[in-house]
Image: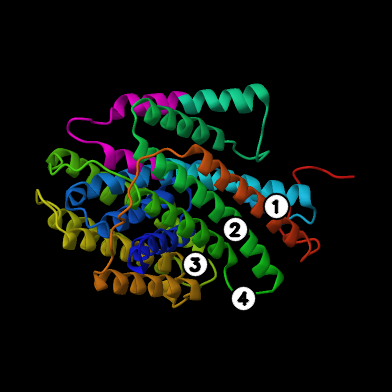
Amino acid sequence: MKNKEQFLNVLIVAMSLATAWAIRGQFGHEQGAAWAGAIGGLALILVSKRKDWYQKMILVALASAVGWGAGGMISYGIVVGYGKADNFINAFYGLSMLFVIGALFGLLGGGLVGLVLQSTRINKVKWGSLFAEMVAGGLISYYFLVEQIGFKMTPPRSEAWAIILGAGLVMLWHMAREKQNAAIRVAIFSALGAGFGFAFGNFLQILGNVLEVQFNMWNVMEYSIGFFGGGAMAYGVFSSKWPEEDVKTENWLNKSSLFIIAIIIPLIVFRETLSYSRFVKYLTAYSNTDNLALYSTTMVAIVLFTMMILLFLRLKKDEYQKKDIAFFFFLYFLVYTFLSYMTKGLAVGHMEINHHLYLVNIGLIYLLIKRDKTAVFYRLTDRVTIKKWFIYFLTIIIFIALLSIIAINIHDEMGGAHDRFQLK
């Protein structure tokens, strides 16, 4: 990067996805990851200074939501436990598999964003055939690796990681076949960043627990994968050479994409986490549980409905400017944060410090964006540097091994630890 101003592009996206991914911890699964992914995609376009990309902002947000959200089907709770083991084999296995899981999140998240940016009127991405190939690749990968070979990463839990692996590999094959090198760069950088972030985040969680830090260290791990994954995705985008095309996205495509982001994803989050029955479970410790649950779910419904109306009113135009992206980004972000507060008992005045830090992060992001001094990269490339990426990969694995050695030497038996391999 030429100077420190260029670093702000990467930092803003990294902080945005990191904060959103930490908030995602209150919702989990695909829908929570999809909301967070959309926020990361919007941040990317907001700081890009590419007016031709402004018209693609909804498509980029949707691609990021689908890509990062798909990984939400992967079960990793027990893998985190492997990382807490008190012996090297299991600890290294745990951190390494978290690298793989994080890489799968980033691979699809960054890859689909890159494909949207690379798609032009003349050289359109064949989305129908691509997704058909990815679904087929995911199924083949799962049945070959899990059912036939019997390789299981997280027994007895779901092995859905194999589905994402197959889909991601097919996506890379499609990109290589179509010579979409810039998209490949984003996918690989995102994979390396998110993978490193997840493994490193687990180490930070272990360290915090050992030091008895009075903080939600699971949230720290989530912030880590979002920060390094988002930053790597941003670096991949801003350092790559992209086609320029000042063509408006078709209105029906924007509207249908907005429908998924502004209505479908929030409604799934509402059903799975914020419905009346869910709030009853959250608030069982209080005498007036039913009234509190009704109040909470009503407030959430009002906020979500208001957000939907505002987004459709603001984005009904045919051409978008930077202020439209900022409106979408901050509204979507703040509503997500408000929902997170509600899940922890805002209705009864219960608030946790990590939620306040979400607001601090959003405030810092706002101030950085307001400076309007973010700069683009000047040395752009679309080269696929496999040798260099392999060196990065080896460096990360060696670093993970060192973290594993440190981890097993700073604690004995730890709560939540698991052994994948039984040692005599």
Q: Find the distance from the CA under tag 1 to the CA under tag 2.
A: 11 Å
Identify the element where label 3 is drawn.
loop
Where, by quadrant of the figure, is residue 126 drawn? top left
Dot 1 or dot 3, earlier in sequence: 3
Residue ID for mark 1: 401
The amino acid sitting under disc 3 is Leu
Near mark 3 (Cα within 10 A), the count class, few <14, some 14-19 or many ≥20, is some
Q: Nearer the viewer, mark 1 or mark 3?
A: 1
Q: Which mark is residue 200?
A: 2
| Furthest residue in direction right, as rendered | 424
* Disc with the residue nearer the chain's start (2 vs 4): 2
Between marks 2 and 3 in the image, the one whose residue lies nearer the viewer:
2
Q: How far apart are marks 1 and 3 (CA)?
A: 43 Å
- Mark 3 / mark 4, whichever is N-terminal: 4
Q: What residue type is labelled 2?
A: Phe
Q: Residue 214 carries which label?
A: 4
Residue 65: x %, y % from top left: 36, 47
Q: In this view, does 235 lie to the left or right of 317?
A: right
Instruction: Using residue 372 as the reference point, say whether residue 67 is left or right of it.
Output: right
Label 2 to label 3: alpha-carbon separation: 34 Å
Bounds of the magenta segment = 110-136
Task: Sort mark 1 into few (<14), some (14-19) or many (20+) by Cα contacts within 10 Å.
Answer: some
Identity of the residue drawn at 28% across and 68% down: 369
Q: How far apart are marks 2 and 4 (CA)?
A: 19 Å
